[in-house]
Amino acid sequence: MTSDEIIFLAPLPAFRKRTRLAKMVKVFHGRGLRSTLLGWERRSGELEVLRWEGDGVSEHTILRGGGYVSAKARAMYPLWMIVVFFTVLRLGKGKTLFCLGWETAFPARVAAMFTKARIVFDDADRFSMLIRLPRLLKQLLVGLEKWTSRKSFLHVVPGWSRYEWRVPSMLLLRNTPLREDFEAARIAAPPRLDVDLVIYVNGWINWDTGSPIFLKALDRLCEMKVNVVMHIAGRVVSESGEALIRHPNVIFHGELKQREALALYPASDIVLTYYDPVVAINPHAESNKWGDCIYFGTPFIVNEEVETAKHFAEAKAAWQVPYQDADGLASLLKKISERRDLLDSARRALHTFRDAYPPYDVQLSEILTRLGIK
């Protein structure tokens, strides 16, 4: 391990599995830094499929198995934490470690008591809001989250609404695109299809990210004779998602590279970003898609239970509909298809958010400065 190397620990097989990490690597590479991932390959062969192309980046597996969204995966998280603890001990003294999630940052910070490593706690999804626990265990977990936040060199968060505390180590890193990815995607954008309405859905196509609602709304739009096409890009992990991508009005692109996924924003009229409120973290979502929408001027619809999106709706840069109201969503989409002026107005409103949502590389520069990296 060399002094110009940033080491990441993440419960993922490859940098490209998480957009947030992939963007960090690009910025670090531009600064002449090498990036190394020590990760968890949940399905055999994932790393080879997703492996980073190019020099200066290496990816290694320290835990295998478990899959995703399964009882086995959940049961393996304690094992992941143990593996992280001993891995950090083996790395030696004085390293800078970027740790994705509390489940990684906590054991790393405990090990850092012996190694004096600098822990950057990248808290993309607050762990205590992702799982259900009895009240006493929940209180214990929250206490450990606060300890990790206070004791980390930096605690990087995508938004403030998830946290009931503030400490000097906390630093905001909003989910926005890299400037170079934005420019490349804007140039590579395919032409808009000649239909009444082009909808875009991307990311995890799951039961709790709107797939059953979108399927019902799409059927309703077809009944209302709206000539609609829905672009879908991402990973399908639910039966309703599988049914959605088989719909005759859907174009399914599979899992795309970041620039390819971004290029579909300017080719679309509206983006759907739904988060089922039964999941505790979802009312506090900080979607990558909102930052993308700001830069490409593509308005979005989000369910009204998402508190963190209300300032967009109040500025008329987005619309909100109750999560389960598929008919309400279909009616809104039909109205938008008939009133292009609504889209034009929302695009202008989105532009006003640019100053509050700087490009990702500009934001990451502050983190590098705090780390003493020029």
Image: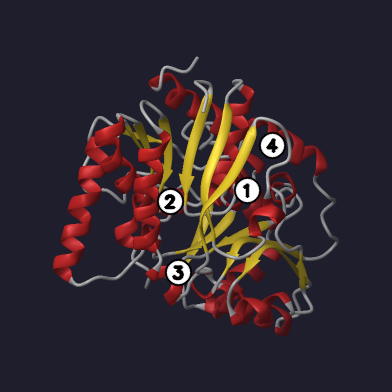
Gap between marks 2 and 3 measured at Cα: 39 Å
Q: Earlier in the sequence, mark 2 or mark 4?
A: 4
Which three-letter amino acid code belongs to the residue tagged 3?
Answer: Ala
Label 1 neighbour load within 10 Å: few <14, some 14-19, many 20+: some
Q: Earlier in the sequence, mark 3 or mark 1?
A: 1
Q: Are marks 2 and 4 in contact (CB under 8 Å)?
A: no
Residue linked to disc 1: 16
Label 4 neighbour load within 10 Å: few <14, some 14-19, many 20+: some
Q: Are marks 4 and 1 in contact (CB under 8 Å)?
A: no
Give the percent coordinates (x, y) of residue 231.
73, 63
Label 3 neighbour load within 10 Å: few <14, some 14-19, many 20+: few
Question: Disc 3 vs disc 4: which is toward the camera?
Answer: 3
| Viewer-proximal residue among 347 and 38 | 38
Gap between marks 1 and 2 measured at Cα: 34 Å
Q: Earlier in the sequence, mark 4 or mark 1?
A: 1
Which three-letter amino acid code belongs to the residue tagged 2?
Answer: Glu
The residue sitting at 39% across, 65% down in the picture is 305
Tell me the SS state at disc 1.
helix
Residue linked to disc 3: 73
The residue sitting at 56% across, 77% down in the picture is 213
Gap between marks 3 and 1 measured at Cα: 20 Å
Give the percent coordinates (x, y) of residue 106.
30, 47
Tell me the SS state at disc 4.
helix
Q: Earlier in the sequence, mark 1 or mark 2?
A: 1
Question: Disc 1 vs disc 2: which is toward the camera?
Answer: 1
Q: Are marks 3 and 4 in contact (CB under 8 Å)?
A: no
Residue linked to disc 4: 181
Residue linked to disc 2: 314
